[in-house]
Image: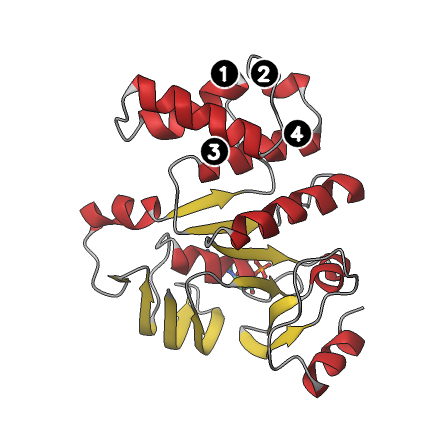
Amino acid sequence: MITLENVSKIYPNGTEALKNISLQIEDGEFVFIVGASGAGKSTFLKLLIREEKASFGKISVNGYNLMKIRKRKIPYLRRTMGIVFQDFRLIEKMTVFDNIAFAMRVIGAPEKTIKKRVTEVIDMVGLKGKEKSRPNELSGGEQQRVSLARALVNKPKMIIADEPTGNIDPVMSFEIMKKLTEINKTGTTVIVVTHEHNLVREFGGRVIIINGGEIEIDDHLPPRKPSSPGPAPAGAGASGSYLKGEIK
Ligand code: ADP
């Protein structure tokens, strides 16, 4: 669970990137964070993974008080989350298998467990048969699926995806989003940061729009198609339609 209470972030140069933000994200939610460039989305993510510390307010993430957490505890906070980056961040010299296994090796998992779990997540993201390929032998969509498998391999409570579809084509973007909704259905919290309003409209769900460091809208949007993830949660009423018009 994520709780922010009156959180502000002022960078050393005086830029107020987030202004008095309060929100709560429950375990198991699927949330889009949307906003134009410079709105404060990356700052929000950096606060969640404690790459940056809030200037004011209170933040807790998966049981950790981020205003008080000690440096040596930060890796444990980060183990509760899997992160998917826009630019994949795969290791070029390593095979698909090893890129994913690496995330387990750094926490000292036994090789037997690694083999079983890596095979499982490769299957989950639809990359069976690609275990021995290297990133440069894969399409952008496939590389993003490797990065998703790596994020999932240690069974995090939460997946944070930062512009996961920014470098892949629309068909693959849809596939990645579908995978994220499937993962969400197994109980994992999913937070997707994006500026692609089309995807948000397609999939619906909770949408938090950040504008100029402030939350402009926090509401539920119904999915556009029946093939998209589940029914809109309660509350997707009049304001949902407003959002529909809002997101172009
Ligand atoms: P987004 O991810 O939505 O593009 P950011 O969180 O990166 O937005 O940026 C929000 C605001 O904070 C912008 O005005 C940006 O220039 C500023 N900003 C981001 N990082 C820093 C930093 N390290 N130092 C100073 N200002 C920053």
**The label number, if any, that marks residue 134 in the structure image:** 2
Mark 2 and mark 1 in contact? Answer it, CB < 8 Å.
yes
**The label number, if any, that marks residue 150 in the structure image:** 3
Q: Is mark 4 on a helix, strand or loop?
A: helix
Mark 3 and mark 1 in contact? Answer it, CB < 8 Å.
no
**Residue 197 picture quarter:** bottom right
Task: Give the vertical position of 88 relative to 76 (above or below).
Answer: above
**The label number, if any, that marks residue 94 in the structure image:** 1
The answer to whether the residue bearing label 1 lies less than 8 angstroms from the nearest atom of ligand 1 is no
Task: Give the vertical position of 224 relative to 8 (above or below).
Answer: above
Position of residue 217 measured from the top left corner of the image (x, y, whole percent): 61, 79
Task: Look at 28% across and 31% down and name the residue there.
Answer: 107
Real-space CA distance between mark 2 and mark 1, rounded to the nearest whole angstrom: 6 Å
Amino acid type indicated by mark 3: Arg
Task: Look at 32% across and 18% down and name the residue there.
Answer: 112
Mark toward the viewer: 4 or 1: 4
Task: Give the vertical position of 52 relative to 108 (above or below).
Answer: below
Q: Mark 4 points at which residue?
A: 142
Q: Which circle's residue, 3 or 1, is located before the other in the chain? A: 1
Q: How crowded is mark 3: few (under 14 residues within 10 Å), some or many (20 or more)?
A: many
Amino acid type indicated by mark 2: Arg
Real-space CA distance between mark 4 and mark 1, rounded to the nearest whole angstrom: 15 Å
Real-space CA distance between mark 4 and mark 2, rounded to the nearest whole angstrom: 11 Å
Position of residue 33 measured from the top left corner of the image (x, y, whole percent): 58, 64
**Residue 165 picture quarter:** top right
Horizontal side of residue 169 vs 13, given as left or right: right
Q: Is mark 3 on a helix, strand or loop?
A: helix
Real-space CA distance between mark 3 and mark 2, rounded to the nearest whole angstrom: 14 Å
